[in-house]
Amino acid sequence: MTYQTIQTLEELEALYPTRPGPAVLAADAEADRILPEYRTVIERSRFVVITTSGPNGIDVSPRGGEAGFVVVEDEHTLLLPDLSGNNRIDSMRNLLADPRVGLLFMVPGLGESLRAQGTVAIDRSPGLRRRFEDNGKVPHCVWVIRIQSIFVQGPRAAVRGRLWESTGRDAPRMRRLIDDVVVFLRKRVGRA
């Protein structure tokens, strides 16, 4: 197979001409602050995907919690506690080298997602950490995220991927697949 790779911005833009419709509306809805409508999505989100970049490459990391686990502090600031996870700290290593972050907030059942970009300061002050105490556990730190760009991403990808459809009869098969992956990983690290 021969690939025809795009080499210039002009070539790329020729493939995606600007036209009226959802794409233009999404571009028009981009803001440099958290609008009230965007705040509502963030406060209802139970899942966010975070992207960082550093000396060892790019990291994409999921974060989840009860709705409201990411706090809108003001129209320019989000607070994200570093709740217990796998302790790899890949994202935080990246943030120390390059504080830029991309976020994708998702709400179950909602096809649209919310995309945001900004910069992160990793805060370890006891008072801020205590604000996020959960069942007696205090996070090691809290990300203070300054939003630079935020907008709604249309539902096409979620609809095409049937993201929120019930897996129905596939659920037991998928559960077995996940269990097999977990067993494999435990054997690999000697925790079988």
Image: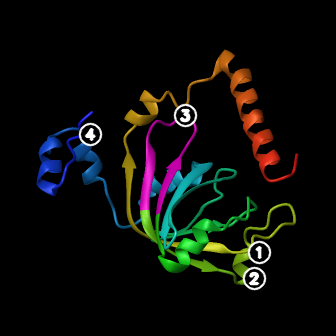
Q: Amino acid at mark 3?
A: Gly
Residue beneath disc 3: 109
* Residue furthest front in the image: 1
Tag 2 and tag 3, C-beta contact below 8 Å: no
Foreground: 55 or 85?
Answer: 55
Q: CA distance from mark 4 to mark 1?
A: 42 Å
| In contact (CB < 8 Å): disc 4 and disc 1 | no
The kind of residue on which mark 2 rests is Pro
Q: Quadrant of the N terminus?
A: top left
Which residue is under mark 2?
A: 126
Q: Residue at x 72, y 63 (%)?
A: 83
Q: Is residue 119 left or right of residue 63?
A: left
Residue 28 position (above or below residue 54): above
- Earlier sequence position, callout 2 versus callout 3: 3
Within 10 Å of disc 1 (Cα), the crowding (few <14, some 14-19, many 20+) is: some
Q: Which residue is mark 1?
A: 130
In the rendered structure, are the residues bearing label 1 and label 2 in contact, judged by CB atoms less than 8 Å apart? yes
Question: Residue 49 vs residue 23: left or right?
Answer: right
Measuring from the top left, give residue 49's x and y in whole percent.
Answer: 54, 53
111 within the magenta span:
yes
* Cα separation between marks 2 and 3: 36 Å
Q: Main secondary structure of the magenta part?
A: strand
Query: What stretch of residues is rendered in magenta?
Result: 102-116
Callout 1 amino acid: Arg
Q: Secondary structure at mark 4?
A: helix
